[in-house]
Amino acid sequence: MNRDIILHEVGPRDGLQFENQTVPSWEKLKWIGALIDCGIEIIQVGSFVHPARVPQMADTDLLLTDLRKDKIRSSGVIFSGLVLNERGLERGLACGVDLFCMGVSASETHSRKNTGMSIAEATDRIIAMAARAEEAGKKVQLSVQSAFGCGYEGHVPAEKVTGLVQKFLDAGFKTISLADTAGHATPDQVEKLFTAVAVLDDEAEWACHLHNTYGLGLANCYAALKVGVNYFESSFAGLGGCPFTKIAGGNVCTEDLVHMLQRMNLKKKVNLGKLIEIANDVGRFFEREMSGYVHKTGPILEYERV
């Protein structure tokens, strides 16, 4: 398995948005700086939503502005941001987002709870926003949320997912994520759905955003890896969850994912020790035990393979 695997750390956004305890901006900057030092390629700094809706994200503009000042340290790192509407896009453009992440839910109920829009309305608006971001010279990743099931509606037909993916591809967007917002995915389902979308376009790049609500996060990552997914979104210390789904569960834990990949001789240049330090620091801040395993057990050291 000799190909580029790209890590997209979403802890500062998806990880922290679910926390009631406000994290000071300086603490977030410390964690993001440590992630940069670990060698993570893409870091999702925050989302551009109304502060009343997700108070934890009120300082996203400030964080991006401060990160941009340290040009040497952040050189080569892609800073991403989640936007839901045109106002959020304007804010992201103003403070220097590199990669805009935008999504449409395959579940009508989740779409309305998350964005206040129907699937059809959200699709039209997101595609128009994505086109505007590209015109401004920015990278764009479009996602299908609730792709593997919905906490409100249950089963989501694969045809709804592939239909949304086809609309994104027809509009000219080639980087597409399938998100397991409710954490319902199973490894066989991940293989089947990514295989189904891959045949729609040979030039597309595929990303996965998998939650660990029912304990299958890493197994689903491995399934995605097997069928050619290159971009993996995860959160330090396993923080996170969508506040607008029925049962929220944490993201795949970054340090556990990196540990698995490194045992498979992948992502060797990422500093796992520093990732574990971040997870422990996050645990001290929130004064509770974090999700994940490797920060508690320590990593398995290198040994000769047989």
Image (tube, rainbow, N blue to C red):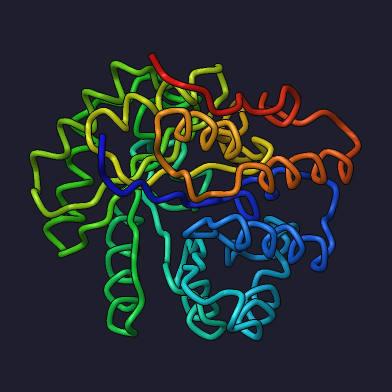
Q: Quarter holding the C terminus?
A: top left
- Residue positioned 27% across, 61% down in the render: 124
Residue 271 at x, y percent in the picture: 60, 48
Looking at the image, residue 67 lies above or below residue 247:
below
Would residue 59 appear left or right of 77 to someone viewing this image? Answer: right
Query: As rendered, which of 46 and 244 lies closer to the eye?
Result: 46
Residue 286 at x, y percent in the picture: 87, 41
Query: As rendered, which of 263 and 87 lies closer to the eye?
Result: 263
Residue 225 at x, y percent in the picture: 31, 32
Would residue 300 appear left or right of 166 to someone viewing this image? Answer: right
Query: As rendered, which of 284 and 168 lies closer to the eye?
Result: 284
Residue 261 at x, y percent in the picture: 45, 34
Would residue 157 appear left or right of 268 to someone viewing this image? Answer: left
Query: As rendered, which of 272 and 281 lies closer to the eye?
Result: 272
- Residue positioned 69% across, 48% down in the render: 274
Looking at the image, residue 145 lies above or below residue 205:
above
- Residue positioned 27% across, 64% down in the render: 127
Looking at the image, residue 175 lies above or below residue 128:
above
